[in-house]
Image (cartoon, rainbow, N blue to C red):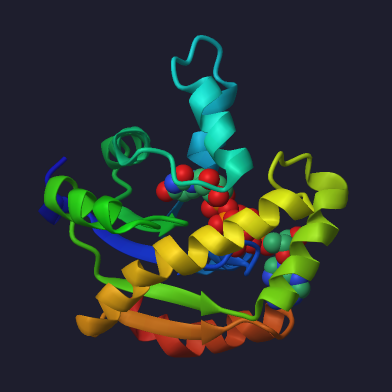
Amino acid sequence: FSRDEVKVIFVLGGPGVGKGTQCAHLVRDYNFVHLSAGDLLRAEQAREGSEFGELISTYIREGKIVPQEITIALLRNAMQDEVKTGRTKFLIDGFPRKMDQAVKFEEDVAVSEFTLYFECTEEVMLHRLLKRGETSGRADDNIESIKKRFKTFVETSMPVIDYYRTQNKVITVPCEKTKEEVYDLLKEKISDRMS
Ligand code: UP5
Ligand code: MG
């Protein structure tokens, strides 16, 4: 597919802030495809015969960013499959979380319309992740991994959000309140841009 065929919105924010939750709401109300980079990586990790399985699993447990070539290839393939069926509007969740990914994706795949940035204190995110960890089975929903994910977010991913801020392309949504309240606020901020 060509870059002009697709519309891309990046969805960023700290670990456990509610990116997946809010994207699910958006998909229900608007005609967008939700692609979570983390979900794509976990699926690739679990895929029989994947040459990257081991590497992905180590990076995720350590809260580190998987080399961009792998993640971008997964995203591009997933987008390709959707474009074939005529779906061209994408919420890209949890990506780009490192500057090199942002640059490469916008060079090779498509330029983002804007970035949704979900904002929340670490205290609240920690609480949400530990609670989810009771049932999620995710290898990184434990206190050691969560601390590493927070550190990576501050050091490596915040600069991406700052970069898009300099371009005036960030819409910030506070996420401390309930899922429904957060979504009401989100909708208010973006409904005119979701067509
Ligand atoms: N919850 C949500 N909203 C709530 C609210 N308002 N009030 C109360 N509870 C709320 O939500 C998390 C939990 O909180 C859920 O139980 C939910 O019900 C509750 P969720 O919507 O899942 O939050 P989300 O932000 O999606 O959290 P997630 O854990 O998915 O965020 P991460 O960014 O940490 O995880 P991701 O899957 O994106 O990435 C995982 C790892 O993959 C990374 O650490 C990294 O190692 C790797 N990765 C890469 O290397 N490269 C990439 O490009 C992407 C990922
Ligand atoms: Mg998620």
In the image, residue 176 above or below residue 150: below
Q: In the rendered image, which quarter is residue 90 located in?
A: bottom left
195 vs 175, left or right, is left
Quadrant that contains the N terminus? top left
Q: Residue at x 51, y 31 (%)?
A: 56
Q: Nearer the viewer, residue 134 or 113?
A: 134
Residue in view at x 68 percent, y 49 percent: 145
Left/right of residue 25 with respect to residue 125 in the rendered view? left
> Which residue is farthest right?
134
Q: Is residue 157 visible?
A: yes
- For the residue pair 40 and 67, the one nearer the viewer reads as 67
**Image coords of residue 169 (percent x, y):** 27, 79
User: Does residue 195 appear in the picture of this structure?
Assistant: no
Q: Residue at x 35, y 56 (%)?
A: 98
Could you say where residue 39 lies in the image, as x and y percent from the top left? Answer: 55, 42
Question: At which x and y percent is residue 6?
Answer: 22, 54
Q: Which residue corresponds to the image point at 46% horizontal and 57% vertical from the top-left? A: 93
- Vertical comparison of 103 with 122: above or below: above
